[in-house]
Image (cartoon, rainbow, N blue to C red):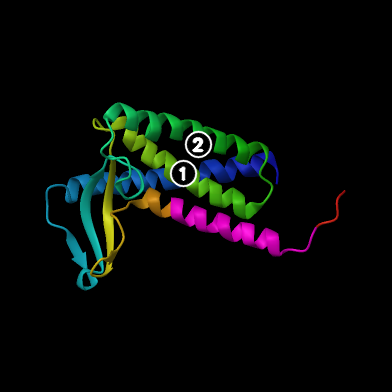
Amino acid sequence: MSYRYKITVIFSFLFLIFSTDQLTKFWAVEKLMGKSPFIFLNGLFQFVYAENPGAFLGLGGAWPRELRFVVFALVVFFGLGCMLWYLVKRESLKINLFAYTFILAGGVGNLWDRVFHDDGHVIDFMLIEIWGPLRTGVFNIADIFIVIGVLMALFGEYLVKKSPARPKA
C-alpha cells in the first residue's frame, strides 16, 4: 500500500466517523438529556441519555477527575498517536488498516468528549436490552466503530494465520 493510499483512508474515515459521532452526540444532548428514553421494538433498542465518566461499562468512573484525565485522556492520546504512526509507517494489510482506523476514529471521538466536557465524561445514548439482565451498557457511535475495528482486527489475524506461509524474499 502506498503512503498516499494510507493517508487517504485514515483521514477520510477519521473525518467521517468523528463527524458522525459528534453530530449524534449533539443530537443526544438536544433531544434526550433530561427526557424519558425513546423505546423501539418493545424495548429491544432504546435511545437514552447517559454521561460516562469512566471507560468501558463505567470502569474507573469513580476515580478522581485528575486520575481519570491522566488515564483516559493523556494515555489514550499517546496510544492513539502511536496507532496513527504505526498505521502510516508500518501497516501492510488492508484489513488491519481499516480495522485500526476504525478504532482510532472511535477513540478520537471519545477522547474529544473527555477533553472538552467539563467533567471529562463521554456522552452515550444507545442501549440494547435483549431480555432481563441481558443487555449492553449505554454506548455511542464511537464505541460501535471501536468494536467493529476490534472484530475486524481479530478476523484479520485469523486470516493471516490461516493463509499459507509466504516464502521469504
Q: Which residue is found at the position 52% from the left and 44% from the top?
A: 12
What numbered label is drawn on residue 80?
Answer: 2
Q: Residue at x 19, y 65 (%)?
A: 39
Lower sequence index among marks 2 and 1: 2
Give the x, y percent position of residue 81.
52, 33
In this view, which residue lies farthest toward the right?
A: 169
Dot 1 crowding, Cα within 10 Å, few <14, some 14–19, many 20+: many
Q: Nearer the viewer, mark 2 or mark 1?
A: 2
Q: Residues within 10 Å of mark 2 (few under 14, many from 20)?
A: many
Decide which of 95, 135 is in the foreground and name it.
135
Q: Residue 149: which disc?
A: none
Residue that carries the numbered disc 1 in the rendered image: 105
As helix, strand or loop, the secondary structure at mark 1 comes to helix
Q: Which residues are magenta?
A: 146-165
Residue type at tag 1: Ala
**Is 26 on the left or on the right of 18, as rendered?**
left
Q: Amino acid at mark 2?
A: Leu
> What residue is shown at x 39% (from left), y 41% (from top)?
109
Helix, strand or loop for disc 2: helix
Furthest residue to the top? 66
In the figure, residue 19 lies in which quadrant? top left
